[in-house]
Amino acid sequence: MKNTGEKVPDNKGHFGQYGGRFVPETLMPALIELDKAYNKYKKDKNFLAELVLLQKDYIGRQTPLYLAKNLTELIGGAKIYLKREDLCHTGAHKINNAIAQSLLAKKMGKTRIIAETGAGQHGVATATGAALAGLQCEVYMGTDDMKRQSLNVFRMRLLGAKVTGVSIGSKTLKDAINEALRDWTANVHNTHYVLGTAFGPHPYPMMVRDFQSVIGKEARKQILKAEGRLPDCLIACVGGGSNSIGLFYAFLKDKIRMIGVEAGGHGIRSGKHAARFAGGSIGVFQGCKSYLLQDKDGNVLGTHSVSAGLDYASVGPEHCYLRELEKIEYTYATDKEALNAFELLSNTEGIIPALESAHAVAEAVKVASSMPKKSIIIVNLSGRGDKDVEQVAKIKGITL
């Protein structure tokens, strides 16, 4: 790994050349307020004690690190361990960040929180955090995503949140974020924006990473207890990048292979994908400088993925920085590969993964087969697949 020796992010939120704050002046006071509050409360013993208690008794941490023996035997290579974030309350890693930000918002004196969501898991997690903290909640969601994740829409409303459909643009996550930012600009006095991934203007990439880093901290201790050594490889899917940086962060100083898996959609040549590192270039988008799927004039390109949570035009700035340092490598899995992995894990282990997580499972199958049996892989199983069953059935032509 190359080492520049610089502190990341710096005080302005830069990870090398990536990150920063590219927002309207009207949002700067809110971001500065959030930055000060986060830097205060992340050192506050009472805040941290309350968060740890909620992680244990409400979220259900620590989550297990499970040796997938059947899958390992079927592949015939490295041992495959699954970090079971699918067993968190609400069914995904998203709750780690949503609960923490809801708690922070309440400490800041906010009475309302807003969020964007793609697959719906972050929306459900935020609605859950709002209910727990006694805050009003509104979630913005692209209308196309609302159709393919109708169950999560109902769950959010059941939890007391207002779900607002966004029918402009691509009608997916990108446009939901735009609408949430507009709302925040108009209501900064009483509203906190619970951004769901390690993206956006500073301090969000740093803050979300820190709240999700519990995944890797646990996994590190668990694998040392189970195997007496660190793993050879870590694999996680990458949309905005919170579940992956959450796993990777605790291992960044170790000589371990780390692989982030983007959404390959119908393949890179098709143009219908969300593989930013395979088909994108550096640009500024929704608050930060990062890799972005854009044309030569800087216009944001449309994206596609079978998984709503990976269907996004950009990626977290710290991922760009770590890729540049050659600490993490990035690849992609196609829709077909993810769907095959979705069925494979279900059939072999009795675990139905989220379609997002299935991208990581697909890569693990490839990598494990070429590694010695004594090798160890940890896959972050970032969410469960209940939300995707109906969609997969439709794709397979099965009427439920």
Image: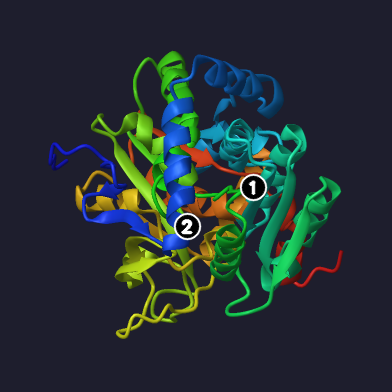
Name which residue lies at 34% across and 24% down. 230
The local secondary structure at tag 1 comes to: loop
**Residue 45 on image: x %, y %:** 50, 15
Name which residue lies at 16% across and 39% down. 6
Q: Quadrant of residue 40?
A: top left
Pointer 2 local density, CA inside 10 Å: few below 14, some 14–19, many at least 20: some
Residue position for label 2: 27
Considering the image in quadrants, where does the C terminus appear?
bottom right
Identify the amino acid type marked 1: Asn
Identify the amino acid type marked 2: Leu
Name which residue lies at 43% across and 18% down. 221
The local secondary structure at tag 2 comes to: helix
Gap between marks 2 and 1, in whole Å? 13 Å
Residue position for label 1: 190
The figure's colour scheme reads rainbow
Q: Quadrant of residue 164?
A: bottom right
- As drawn, 241 above or below 339: above
Q: Is residue 90 visible?
A: no
**Residue 17 on image: x %, y %:** 22, 56
Residue 254 is marked as: none
| Closest to the observer, 127 or 35 | 35
**Residue 159 on image: x %, y %:** 81, 45
